[in-house]
Image (cartoon, helix red, strand yellow):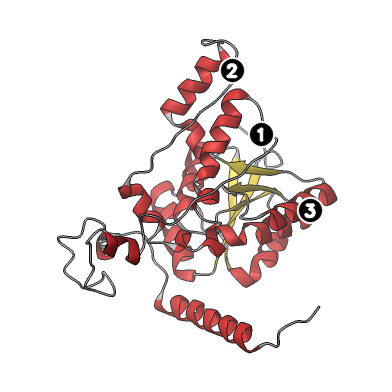
Amino acid sequence: MATATQVKRYAIVGTGGRIVMFLEPICKDFAEETALVGMCDVNQGRLDYYQNKIQKDHGYDKVPTYLANDFDKMIDETKPDTVIVCTTDQFHHEYIIRALDKGCDVITEKPMTIDHEKCNAIFLAVNRTGKNVRVTFNYRWGPGPSLVKELLQKNTIGEIIHVDMEYLLNTSHGADYFRRWHREKEKSGGLMVHKSTHHFDLVNWWIDAAPQTVFGMGRLAFYGKENAQKRGVDSPYERYLGADTSKDPFALKIEDDKTPKPSISTMKNMMAITEIKTSLETTSPSKTP
């Protein structure tokens, strides 16, 4: 059994769907070696939901919760060794850098961030602080990818001189990305970043190498209202909620989903922030060189 000084202390920022991948290992599987000391999110309802969940499912003690504005306060008060970042992608760099500057190591959901400017800022913070950042790629641990790695390590097919990887994303999984915030490039970097990062990582991991040059190209060719109409598909409703979607193969019945959702007040606040930002962008004077 680990002593109090050996127990790894973790705090989590972002209590969306990805948090469940960390709660059970910390609160159950490795409970003698780890401790969840704080949770942070913009939505108090989500924090309360997961607070109740870990108490009910794992008999865990009550964990301090903090709203997003109090992220630094959470670190100061709970003193985690490592901060786990599970926010939406466009905020990864912000919390990674702030945690590093507070003296914490970081585990972040993939992708690490969404563009090269934010990536460089993270690298500078790592060099400045000497702390570590680990990016989680859960696809490595699927039975298929793990078996490929095992066979390659055994030199089953000999020297690797070329890799050609093709991944087909079905419409069930693919449609999910266009229902959520992922569809907006400023939030996710687009599927080339958010989704393809899995596949670049698998190839790198399998052959124990990294590419010297990377490029991507693509277009919105299937999803979206205009593409649907070209295929003769028409949605007569503005929103799915409350509409008859029995004949719509892409409909998502949100009322059947029991996972926590943003509260009405949170949604209104987010909409207000967006409106203010848009107003500032449209009314601010243009900059001249």
Q: Give the vertical position of 285 relative to 168 (above or below).
A: below
The residue wearing badge 3 is: 125
Q: Can residue 177 be seen in this view?
A: yes
The residue wearing badge 1 is: 211
Q: In the image, what residue type sits under mark 2?
A: Ile
Quarter where residue 229 is shown: bottom left
Q: Is mark 3 on a helix, strand or loop?
A: helix
Residue 245 locus on image (x, y percent): 18, 65
The residue wearing badge 2 is: 160
The quadrant of the image that shows the N terminus is top right
Q: Is residue 79 visible?
A: no
Residue 12 locus on image (x, y percent): 58, 55
Discs 1/3, front: 1
Viewer-nearest residue: 183 or 154: 183
Please indicate whether residue 122 sits to the left or right of residue 241 in the image. right
Alpha-carbon distance for marks 3 and 2? 35 Å
Q: In the image, what residue type sits under mark 3?
A: Ala
Q: In the image, what residue type sits under mark 1?
A: Pro
Q: What element carries label 2?
A: loop
Q: Give the vertical position of 166 relative to 45 (above or below).
A: above
Residue 256 locus on image (x, y percent): 25, 61
Q: Residue at x 24, y 74 (%)?
A: 237
Q: For mark 1, does the 10 Å Cα neighbourhood hold few (<14), some (14 to 19), or many (20 or more) residues?
A: few
Q: Which residue is drawn at 68% across and 38% down?
A: 213
Q: Is mark 1 on a helix, strand or loop?
A: loop
